[in-house]
Every structure is written in C-alpha cells, then in structure tokens.
Amino acid sequence: MKPILWFEDISLDDVPKVGGKNASLGEMIRELKKDGVAVPNGFALTSESYFDFLQRAGIKDKIRKIISKINIKNLRDLNQKSKEIQNLILKANLPKDLHEKTLKFYRKLSEEYKEKTTDVAVRSSATAEDLPTASFAGMHESFLNIRGEKELILAIKKCFASLFGARVVSYREEKGFDHTKIALSVGVQKMVRSDLASAGVIFTLDTESGFPDVVLINGCWGLGEMIVKGKVIPDDFLVSKRMLLKSYPAIIKKVLGSKELKMISTREKANPTKIIKTSQKEKTSFILSDEEILKLSLWAIKVENYYSRRAGKWQPMDIEWAKDGKSQRLFFVQARPETVHSSREKRSFTEYTLQKEGKILITGISIGEKIGQGRERAKEYLMEHPHTALEIENKVRIHHNLPSRVDKALGAPPAPAAPAKGAKEGAKEAAEELVKA
C-alpha cells in the first residue's frame, strides 16, 4: 500500500485505507467533477502510514498498555491517560521516508496553486467514521489555515493524537470498537478562503422531520468551523428539490441568523485562526445570493443521487461547503452519509401534542422532536450580555406592539434598531428588567 495518495487516486472502495472523509473527497473529484461539483485538490496519508508511524516510533505497545488500564467511568483517569497517549504521539517523529514524502506532496500541491507554501486544511479521517451504527463525525481534530512544512508535520501528528481524545476513547468503548484496530488517515486539502466570504453545512433532507424532498443549507461568515462547533446562529435556507429540478422558483424559506462571530485566518503560525465579531452589515445580510443557494442545492442533489445509486437505496448526505472570497467560487470540502434519519425505522411515526399553550413572548431555533417546558433561568447570562437582553426585549415589544422601556435611555425611535454607541446604560436596564420579569 502506498503511504500517501492524491485525492484523484482515491475512491469509496478505499475507506479502509483513507477513512470515509478522504474516500468521499476522492470519489467526488473522480466522479462528480464532470458534473460541475467543485472540490479543492489535496492528498491523504493512508492508515498504513499511521500504523507504520506508531510501530517505528516505538510507541504502539506503550499505547496499548495505557489503553488497557483506562477506566472510562472515572473521568479524571480517562482524561489523564488520554493526554498521556497524545503526548507520546506528539513527541514522536515521523519516519524519515514518510516525512520526506509528505513534504514532496505538499510542495507539489503548492506548485499547483502557484505558491511557495500554500495554505491547507489538515483533517482527520478515521477508518471507522460514520458507520450505520455509529458516527465519529466531529470527534477527531481538524486544523485550518496551515502553512509551512514544519506546521504541516505538526498538524498531522495532532490529527493522529486526536484519535485518543478522551471523548473519542469513551465513545469507542461504548460502541465496542477495538482501539488498536482503528486507524486514522489524514487529509491535506487546499484551503478555500472562506474567511473572506462564507461557509456552512448542507443536508439533503429536513433534519427535524426527515422529509426527503428538500435541501437545507446553513451558513455563516468566515470559516465553517463556527457552525460545526455550534458557536453561531447561522442563516438557514430551505430549497425544494422537485421545483429546482423543474427550473421553477425553488427557495421555500430564508431565515436570517444573528451570525455575531466569525472565524478568520491569520498569518500567525501558533494561532492560524482567530474568532472576531461580525460587522452590523454582516449580521443583517444573507451570506449567499439566491443564485448561489440554488447552485449549492443542485450540487447537493447530484451528490445525493450519486451516493444513492452507489448504495442501492436513498442515501441522504451531510455536506460541508465553502465560498472563496478571492475567486468568489463555491466548493464542497467534505461529504458524508447522513446517519441519523437514514437509519431510522421509516414505518413508524410518533406525534406529540401540546395540551395547553401559554402566551408566546419570543421564539428561537427549535431542536429535537419532543415537547418540553420549564422556567428560563438566564439571569447571569443576561447581566453579562446586556445587549442580548435588549435584543430580546425589542423582539417581544415588536411582536406585541408594546412601548420600549429603554427607548428614552437609548435616544432612539421605537423601532427594531440596533443600540447606538453609548447605549450600554439602556441595555443594562433592559437586562435588569428582563431578569426581574
């Protein structure tokens, strides 16, 4: 087995070699590029490289010994032994031939994009990722905006080490996976400059109901990690598959998210990304045009159709997309089978009915499928984030056509406007009033 492969030389048949994530990237480049689906180029260190690294670095038996003594029910012990294994990996050196070959591939990728040292995303791709009975999505580490040879090698070792994060070890134990037989491949992919534009996630079904005839797009400004890690309220777009394929108006719904933060790239080697606040214009603007929404949706349908044909059944997809702020081009940077709704029993349906309704003061993003109730206890948060309190009060006021408690303090007309500079007093008053309510 070759230790490193270009994406174009990888297919879905290579999951044991490169994991589901890298195999899917290779499959899209090989089979869907001709249909217009754009995927940034890159290469993958195979699972054989991972095993070879552990063996030749002399740490394989040490890891096995530590793993055998882990008690996952003791969190302190789990975290301590997890860090012990990760430190072993980070302190070890890659075999010389693998080190040199990795840099050779990186230099060639840099040449392709006409740069001396191009910026790349370095992502983990486990060989047991996204199985019908389990999903490791989001558990293994990814490192964005990596530039330079030393930085690349370190990021690769960090990916290897992420296979032994406390959460991952615990999950494998619960699912009955053998720690020593699961390998990690590492994908090195050209970065899309979404820090200058936007990025997000696409599902080829409605994630709440499992309804299959729509495409759901989430997006935020900057790098898509903010959505993957749940750190922002994104824009949402819902598109009808049938209407789109018939060339009819297909956008069913557009919901503007608050998008208060974004992740951008930096030139700092120690901190290649950082999180900053978005501008007022960014908060109040959609991250995609209608044309871009429809283009991404059409690509997503093509990916879903291809994977469904290959699987011999309907296969909804979970796809990560990014827009390059320099070229204004759209890309798919990851694609994996959706594992929640696709594995459910389709002949049963549970309906929940709300027996008694109270007066709605404010609504948010719903999650889950059941009904719950309780008192909102957000005193500390509201006092620490007075402008959030003001935003809540404004929404309630507009919904019920009520006068504002803080218009005087803000010196602003009674309209849904953002607080002006110097409005901290009024915002704080709003927070105090909401806490009392």
Image: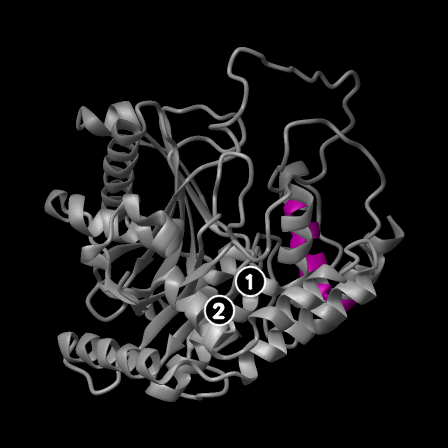
The dot on residue 400 is: none
**Which residue position is annotated with label 1?**
163
In the depicted structure, whether residue 282 falls above or below residue 318: below
Taking the magenta stretch, the answer to whether it contains residue 172 is: no
Q: Which residue lies most toward the left here?
A: 34
The residue at 62%/43% (across/down) is: 398
Q: Report the quarter where the N terminus lies.
A: bottom left
In the depicted structure, whether residue 34 falls above or below residue 89: above
Identify the element where label 1 is drawn: helix
Q: Which residue lies most toward the top here?
A: 347
Q: Is residue 26 visible?
A: yes
Residues marked 2 and 1 touching at CB (< 8 Å): yes
Where, by quadrant of the figure, is residue 154 drawn?
bottom left
Residue 5 position in % (x across, y down): 25, 63
**Which residue position is annotated with label 2?**
159
Q: Is residue 288 visible?
A: no
Residue 328 position in % (x across, y down): 22, 63
Where, by quadrant of the figure, is residue 67 drawn?
bottom right
The residue at 27%/39% (across/down) is: 303
The residue segment tinted magenta is 383-396
Q: Amino acid at mark 1?
A: Leu
In the depicted structure, whether residue 70 falls above or below residue 352: below
Residue 258 position in % (x across, y down): 53, 55
